[in-house]
Amino acid sequence: MRIGAYIFLVKVRLLEALTYRFEVVTGIATRLVLLATAVYLWRAAFSGVGEASGMTEGDMVRYAIVSAAVGPVLASRVAGKVHERVRTGDISMDLLRPVAMPAQWLAEDVGESLGAGLLLSLPLLVSGTLLFGPALPAGPVAALLFPISLALSYGISWLLSALCGLVPLWTAEIGNLGNAKDGVLRILSGSLVPLWFFPDWAQNVSRFLPFQYTYQTPLAIFIGRGLGVREVAQAFVAQAAWILVLGAVFAWGWSRGRRLLMTQGG
Amino acid sequence: MSGAADTGDLGRRWPRWRPGLLRHARVAACFIRLALQTQLDYPVFLVSWLIVLPVQYFGGLWLLQILTVRFDSLAGWNFPVICFLFGLAGLSQGLVVTFFIGTWEMDRLVIRAELDQMLVRPLGVLFQVMFRHVNLIGLLDLVPALLIFAYGSRLVGFTWRPLTVLELVAVLVGATAIRAAVYVLVGSLAFWTSRTRSLVLFSANLLDRTTHFPLSLYAYWVQLALTFAVPIGFVSFYPTAGLLERGDLVALPFAAAAWTPVAGVLFFSLASAVFARGVARYTSAGS
């Protein structure tokens, strides 16, 4: 059964993540420190201000905790990995395996993300709660919708990374474009400052870009902002649409780039 | 004629030759020339950085501008002062990335035993670590940093007099030394734990969050720690208050540009002492 091979890749990556305990402890500690800086930022911002853009200090602290927790899950390394494998030529080994290459990358990344979720996200959620206040979903509806939205987020953020990973098939020496994508994502995903604080024109532009549907959409659901039926439906449709669009672009790019790679490898 | 053969310690047989400052400067210039030549051979790799760095600098500043618009100020710091702070922090960041990027990759020296070849050369080891690799990407850091600093100093009405320029130079030298010392300290951990890559990235992130934001938004004990234990406050926070003569913006009495070079010298001395202990402990990777 072919699917068994992918499940095996997921399992291997998961086990690999479990092996490096020192990395896990420093990973949690360093993320907690960065989370603390975000919490202090919101506390300073809200000092003397009760509410801004419909949010209170408590809302934003919760938002920051959950943002830090989902960070390790949403981080996908596929762009860097492909760049490295094309540069070194290891990609030919991937092609020899009897599984489709992009699916192989996806399976490995899902395994890594599951490992990160277990080893980093959960401890971060718990320690963030202990240090800065409870990070609980806004209600049963939010608790139910959050994981669905997060799964869609993962799809978008993986595809964005994978698309950057295709670029080296054309030009290997341009550097890792994934870093450039990450830079834009950091600003426009709402991972630090949500877009509802942005000026109106920026919010309008961002609505038509994929970035805010990675972090902000699930985080807003979690803290209970925009839980109306219409808003939720809009959010999910936007997320699904971006997966379809980016998926189509990726499939097209891969089918072309793959042939280029063959001729280059000789 | 006894003795020479049974002297196990090579160091005692050779005269201890300490090259002077001039020779170090000449070697540093040579390192820089070589690094530039190798990097300019493949200039396209800079392309992705041409996108990343402006996005990072202008995007980061934009987020702070958005917050100061919604919330008026952050811990009493308004946007013009934060912009000045951000630009000042960016300049020393650019300098450290240009000249001392070698301090970011110190774990490689230990894991791959690259330190061996440095130990046998008649030059300071830390000097080689720091100057071995001059980085063109750092110049790309400096451009947005300069633009932001110029904009910030216009917003706050910074007066360019010979004295303030001198203060500014002293601040940049000190701030670069403080940043370099942070990376030397983190990198020296590799002598004990061998893996430090993730800690280096964390330090870079943390330095951003502590030099781009005014320190006064953190708890008092954090401010104390970032003043006396790890003097990151002297990179941009105190010198901004000092250069703008705004002692009211900071809680501790260090609002003067002169403190930054002092903190830089002290902290860098500490870092190089720790590094020296690490080297003493170093055993190469092979047999």
Image (cartoon, coloured by chain):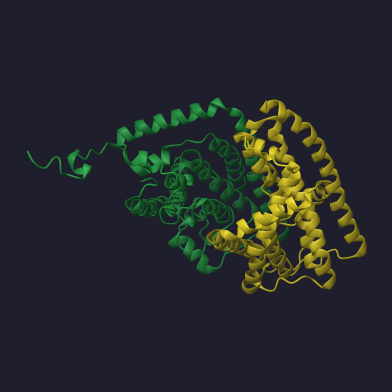
Chain colours: A yellow, B green
Give above or below for A245 relative to A65: above
The image position of residue A97, as x and y in percent, is 70, 41
Q: Which of A263/B180 is in front?
A: A263
The image position of residue A188, as x and y in percent, is 74, 50
The image position of residue A66, as x and y in percent, is 71, 64
The image position of residue B118, as x and y in percent, is 36, 40
Q: Quadrant of residue A113?
A: bottom right
Which residue is depicted at the point 51% across and 64% down?
B223
Q: Quadrant of residue B22?
A: top left
Q: Residue furthest left?
A: B1
Q: Which of B260/A164 is in front?
A: A164
Give above or below for B277 relative to A131: above
Q: Residue furthest right?
A: A230
Whether residue A134 is visible to the viewer of this picture, yes or no, is yes
Q: Is residue B153 left or right of residue B228?
A: right
Whether residue B72 is visible to the viewer of this picture, yes or no, is no
Give above or below for B114 relative to B72: above
Which residue is depicted at the point 75% across and 32% down?
A257
Q: How many marks?
A: 0
Q: Is residue B52 left or right of residue B39?
A: right
For the N terminus of chain B, the image quarter is top left
Give above or below for B107 relative to A120: above
Q: Is residue A10 left or right of residue A200?
A: left
